[in-house]
Image: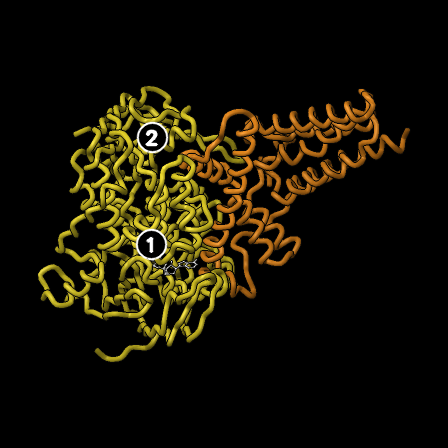
Chain colours: A yellow, B orange
Amino acid sequence: MASREVRARLRGLRWRPIGRATPALDDLDLTIGAGERIGLVGPSGAGKSTVLHALAGVLGEALPGELSGTVHVDGAVGLVLQDPGAAVVAGRIGRDVAFGPENAGLPRDEIWRRTRHALDRVGLRYPLERPTSALSGGELHRLALAGALARAPGLLLLDEPTAMLDPEAAAEVRAAVVGAIDGTDTALVVVDHHVGPWLEHLDRVVVLGPGGRIMHEVSPGALHDGAAAGPRDELTRAGVWLPGVPPPAPLDVPASLVVPDAAGPEVAVDGLVVDLTTRGLRGRTSTRALAGVDARLPAGRLTAVTGPSGAGKSALVAALAGHLRPAAGGVRGAPSRDARSRELARACGWVPQHPEHGLLALRVRDEVELTGRRLGVPVDVEAVLGLLRLDHLVDAHPFRLSGGEQRRLALAAALAHRPGLVLLDEPTVGQDRRTWAAVAGWATAAARHGATVAASTHDADLVALADHRVRLGRDPLGSDRATSPGGVVTA
Amino acid sequence: MTGTTGVVGALGRVNSLVLVTLGLLGLVASLGVRDLASAGVALGACLAFGLLLLPRGTGPAARFLAVVVAVASVAWSTWLLGGHDPTVAAVAGMRIAVLALPGVALAPLVDPSGLADQLGQRLRLPARFVVGVAAALQRFERLGEVWEQASRARRSRGVGPGRGPVGRSRHAASVTFAVLAATLRDATAMSVAMDARGFAAAHARTWAEPAPWTRTDTAVLALGAVAAALPYAVLVVR
Ligand SMILES: Nc1ncnc2c1ncn2[C@@H]1O[C@H](COP(=O)(O)OP(=O)(O)OP(=O)(O)O)[C@@H](O)[C@H]1O
Ligand SMILES: [Mg+2]
């Protein structure tokens, strides 16, 4: 291929975040050509997000640490973070997308031309006045993408843009990305543990190894299902998910880490109706999250809770965890909204969908010990952290972890005291093959040793491991869920 | 601006800078409250202003309960500490009402972006500060949600509220701390997102929308200033 114009170049990049003994990136060289599309993969904690932060120029400014080497980027950069909710800067979608052009000092009519164009390219066809709080998860991703595109970036950086989405919404976001940069010379770097669906759109796949060094650079053609085994095997060993490679076997987690004091409860959900209320400055809004759900969670089994986004999976899990008061119907076998904190903790471990919401301590070690100490249950911190591949992080701050690390820590924190009822909200998001095997192993082992385990998930590999299923449906008419009940099927 | 004249509900049509200024005028007026007469006039003006100009159904009604609680507790403690003088207690309570009512009543009407437009374009405050204020207000909307998440996590992990009022207030304190920590964490994520959209390097920032100023704005602001001056007028006249 003829050498193209260089769009961005990292040279000898080294980054040691504040409070860490070892660098997250070390002696990293990466050159990105104009219009080139790169997939960046590698194990959880390898430094993929950090590479994107370096290219976006936010290392050292917003994120403190020690930086050496050079970063050179031609033109504007658009970065879409994994959690798009954290990136919303305005109350209305038009004004949010306009933020980049405003910073560029563009005249007013050009700001709005770019804003409309960007929203159009991602297929978000709402009035510019629509509140940003009235968007679904997939729509928020598209809003963030529009915000990045409105800067007319020469380089677009996406950090796991589809990890939290159901397959339908993920396909929409991918189509929006590809549609937006097709026929332009915008370069793309996309981080995704599941690189398969991106392959046909990529020019190169870069594999980051542990320790923040580039291990391989592969052509996407060599990674398709049916291509020669060589590079596919190598990447699979590095923990990268590839199309057509079966998932790893779940880790055989020792009984001593998961076996509950007493057998898990038989949980029965009958006609459960739950309304979610949010209070803000502008008043109270109430939405019906569950409208008459019937389900069983048998003890000693792993139940997969599935359904499209917005079907109420997280609401059901939070209700089982004793955090929501039923408007009608009820739950037997799980703690109620009135249960005392200690009894609740003893009975049930809950891993919320956003792991950072479940973390309370200032050190990884304290986080894992906290609940056990409170309840007088001994916890083998070393074994738990070793199993989840967090042993090198015992003294790190829980908020200063990679996305995948933080999710595994939330799991350890909620379950280390071996509760009989285990409730997991999207536990495998953002995991490489090896850490996936640890998380999936924990869930299956807990069930095998008598706990009642439920996981809300859109991960087909985890669903395949489940021996019981609950599927939540969206209202078949697609009308406002607040007024019409969602259908529910239990299998 | 025609068709939207008329006095009733005018506060729903004024810009956010006027709203914030009216809130501050509450402070000015409260400093002029010295005796029962000035207190009565100030509070009366305040209530008349609100009943006449505040659009119906603005924000949660429960927020006024917070004012009632504040007024009652200040009046009560003044009565206890101030030699059981009912007049002194009443004046102290009414002063708090005059101070807090405008801000509490108007807060739900403030639009963060609109306020930023006014602060940046009309008052020419530095863009960095202005955008920071707007982002903070934007986040403030979500404080209730963050609180809910933090208390759920604590409860699930066995460190939730204990029995009795002491246990509960200790829990409230620890959740407050957790909310602060979460706010700091979100602020980091937010500044990464803003800098990645060119905020750090913005030299000559422009504004997507103008900062309009209408006759209604002028009229309401003038009315507010007059109302805030009333307690001082009472003091002078007597
Ligand atoms: N804010 C931070 N402060 C200090 N260290 C951090 C911070 N964020 C991440 N790290 C550490 O830097 C290393 C690389 O993290 P990074 O987030 O880049 O990983 P990643 O490859 O994106 O992982 P994942 O796939 O789990 O998201 C990890 O060891 C992580 O613990
Ligand atoms: Mg990451």
Q: Is residue A171 visible?
A: no
Which element carries disc 2, helix, strand or loop?
Answer: helix
Identify the disc placed on residue A390: 1
Task: Kindly indicate whether the residue at mark 1 contacts the one at mark 2 (C-beta within 8 angstroms).
Answer: no
Judging from the image, mark 2 belongs to the subunit labelled: A
| Residue closer to the observer: B53 or A350 | A350
Judging from the image, mark 1 belongs to the subunit labelled: A
Question: Is the residue marked by circle 2 packed among few (<14), some (14-19), or many (20+) residues within 10 Å?
Answer: many
Image: B83 above or below A411: above
| Residue closer to the observer: B85 or A299 | A299
Q: Is residue A309 left or right of residue B11?
A: left
Of all residues, the one furthest to the right in this rendering is B238
Q: Residue at x 37, y 68 (%)?
A: A25
The residue beneath circle 2 is: A347
Q: Position of residue A457 (x, y in %)?
A: 25, 41
Q: Is residue A204 left or right of residue A128?
A: left
- Quadrant of the rendering where the C terminus of chain A is positioned: top left
Distance between the Cα atoms at labels 2 and 1?
A: 26 Å
Which comes before the other along the chain, label 2 or label 1? 2
Q: Position of residue A181 (x, y in %)?
A: 30, 62
Q: Residue at x 22, y 26 (%)?
A: A296
Q: Residue at x 38, y 42 (%)?
A: A135
Q: Position of residue A216 (x, y in %)?
A: 23, 70
Image: A131 above or below A20: above
Q: Amino acid at mark 1?
A: Leu
Q: Residue at x 63, y 33 (%)?
A: B104
Q: Amino acid at mark 2?
A: Ala
